[in-house]
Image (tube, rainbow, N blue to C red):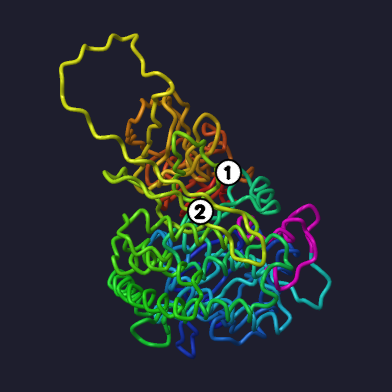
Amino acid sequence: MIGTTLDKYEVLQKVGEGGMATVYRGRHATLNRDVAIKVLHPHLSSSSRNRKRFAREARAIEQLHHANILEIFDYSGTDADDCYIITEFVQGDTLTSLLHQRGKLPSEVAAVIGQSLAIALAYAHREGILHRDLKTDNVMVRRDGTVKLMDFGIARFLDESQVTMTGALVGSPAFMSPEQAREHDLDQRSDLFALGTLLFYLVTGHLPFAGSNPSLILKNVIEGNRPNVSELAPTMSARLADVIERLMATNPDDRFPTAEAAGDALGACLAEARIDPAIDAWSLHAWLEDPDPWEQRLEAHLSEVLLDEGRRCLEQGDHLAALRLFNRLLSMDEDNEEVLALVQGLHGDPSPRSRAGVYLGALAALLLFLGGAGGLVWVGQRYATPEEPPTAELPPPPAPVRAEVSPSPEPAPADVQVEAPAPAPQPRVRIIRKPAPAPAPAVAPVPVAEPNDVVPEEEQQPGWLTINSGELMGDVWLDGRKVGDTRQRHQVAPGAHALEIRGLFLQTHTEQITVSSGEELTLPVRLQPKPGHVVFDASYPDDCSVHLDGTASGTVGSLQRRLMVVDPDRPHEVVVDCGDAGRRSERFGVVPGEVTFPPI
């Protein structure tokens, strides 16, 4: 099609391809203006239903004129030989492409993008239109930093009867709301759930819902089976984490009521960080131009702002807000003595204490709040004296406060007991520090112990397990019980244990370990991401050849229509060549479970 003319539009080059259409860069013959030409695939344009769906996209966006929504200029109509839509041409990258380049985005960058999308959705909703397919593929960021919401291909009008496809869902499973997955009636809050999913993806680099096939993904969406966003992004803004969690509430009534309200909440995240994207230095354009220096400036800026905001909250008596700010600052700079002193002073203990003791104080205050919200959450390990059994295991919190305590040569301070403030009764949190070891006796000749000599059970001391897993993180299970994650130091009873490290996107690591009395065991572990699979449907003959990243992988038939991708965390190019029947190339990013290759 390149070099041909569609009506008054010259087709210049192919710029993208999706499951429904191919996109070309074109030029208006008389206005000499670059445009995007979205041409429906020939095998789809033969269907009147698909032409109507394509027309529905044109109808949906022709009335939308907004800076953050892709503008439509022209439409071929349903009777033309080539069914196409003419839109503005955006020079930039999709959010999917930006994620592939950066891995994940800073909280403030994600908040700027999210606020623009919320504003665009608010406008579309006021016009009576739902998007229904908001995802990173359908959002572009222009080189000047303007965010563009695209592809209203399955949008529907709020005042029309629902357009359905019997026995089939429309939309992208990983971004669907629970009510859309159940094929229930939708309102604007369904788009807000997708916005929360998109933001989750931006700040963590991982989709929240996984599964080996679309049905399992939808099951997890419906049941809300996903990690907390701050578990995967411990250094993110706590306020932004709150916004994302609310957007992704399983019950629509628990989400923001409108896109305007969501946009205001995202604006508050930026205000807390004192980031104004309208200022050139903090604009999205500046980040796109040179992201590494921008992020370095952001970290230095946040170091001052979080400290200043935390002090202000302390002066106003809002200790919880201060601790949330200090927690993020400590996650970026764990040796910040000024913050550690403020947290220590917050708990009224003027005596010298270890850094870990200060962390424990911050933990105690956070536990009070989280306990009042309906359940206690915990990060780090518990500390118990030999005379008293450990307290019940508590799951890790969304905040990355570290709580490691090294044995001190001084006697440990008395147990710290924290009670929730009146009038509402709160659970009591008991934090007990491990006692200091007794001084080593003078060296003297002693008989060598025989192999059958063992330390009496009453004299055994707990051991400690630290797992060094590099950049990847997983949940730690000992003897079938979850004890925390790989970022923590774990107290372990002496003896043999079955260790498992699990993760939503990880292959489960298993091994047997043995910990001696009082041993400090550091275990290096290499975690592996789960493989992904690209599935080829019946439109591909068995003799089509398949290439992965330029290397022949076999034929569709020899692969049994499933291509394994063992390193799903980086982009891959898959090419299927069917000779005269056609050739198709697609580029995939993260492949959680299965991805269906578009039909030829």
- Magenta span includes 316: no
Tell me the crowding category of disc 2: few under 14, some 14 to 19, or many 20 or more residues within 10 angstroms, Cα based. few
**Label 1 packing within 10 angstroms: few (<14), some (14-19), many (20+):** many
Q: Do the residues under discs 2 and 1 have CB atoms within 8 angstroms?
A: no
Q: Which quarter of the picture shows residue 55?
A: bottom right
Q: Residue at x 33, y 33 (%)?
A: 521
- According to the picture, the residue beneath numbered tag 2 turns out to be 417
What's the distance in space between the residues labelled 2 and 1, CA to CA? 60 Å
Taking the spot 48% from the left edge, 49% from the top edge, the residue there is 431
Q: Is residue 396 above or below residue 69?
A: above
Q: The disc labelled 1 sits on which kind of residue?
A: Phe
Task: Assign a secondary structure to mark 1.
Answer: loop
Left or right of residue 302: residue 178: right
Residues in magenta, as a range: 164-190
> What amino acid type is highlighted by mark number 2?
Gln
Describe the element under mark 2 as helix, strand or loop.
Answer: strand
**Residue 276 pos. (x, y %):** 42, 84
Q: Is residue 109 left or right of residue 72?
A: left
Q: Residue at x 79, y 52 (%)?
A: 167
Residue 469 screen position, x and y as percent:
36, 42
The tag on residue 536 is 1
Residue 392: image x %, image y %?
57, 41
Which of these two is toward me, 55 or 291?
A: 291
Relative side of 1 to 473, left or right: right
Most frequent secondary structure within the magenta stretch: loop
Q: Closer to the N terminus: mark 2 or mark 1?
A: 2
* Front residue of 447 and 278: 447
Can I make out residue 14 in this image? no
